[in-house]
Image: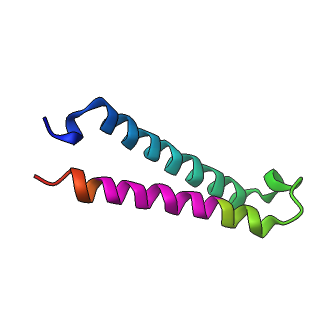
Amino acid sequence: MLARDTRFYRALKQHYLAQKEEALATLDLYFRDSVGIGEHSNVLNEFKEWTHKLCEADEALEVLEKYYEQD
């Protein structure tokens, strides 16, 4: 059985896909309506934090695909 066919692999991939979607949704909201981050004193740090989370998820997905989705 290939790693990509296991429940653990699918769960891990879904975890990072969800993390990516959360980061994208949050960034979209912040870019469209910065009122959503009004309680934060340093707006730029919020953008940096969510951009970093997006990068982490995207990189993790790339690694999984590179090493476990090859035939």
Which quadrant of the view contains residue 43? bottom right
* Left or right of 35 in this view: 25: left
Which quadrant of the view contains residue 12? top left
Magenta span: 50-64
Q: How was the colour assigned to the protein in this rendering?
A: rainbow
* Left or right of 25 in this view: 65: left
User: How far from the left and from the top, in percent, is residue 13?
Assistant: 37, 43
Residue plotted at (58% across, 52% down): 23
Q: Quadrant of the N terminus?
A: top left
Which quadrant of the view contains residue 48? bottom right
User: How far from the left and from the top, in percent, is residue 47?
Assistant: 69, 64
Residue plotted at (20% across, 51% down): 69
* Left or right of 61 in this view: 55: right
User: How far from the left and from the top, in percent, is residue 63?
Assistant: 33, 59
Q: Is residue 52 magenta?
A: yes
Residue plotted at (37% across, 54% down): 61
Q: How many marks?
A: 0
User: How far from the left and from the top, in percent, is residue 2?
Assistant: 15, 40
Q: Is residue 33 magenta?
A: no
Find the residue positioned furthest to the left: 71
Name the main secondary structure of what is drawn in magenta: helix
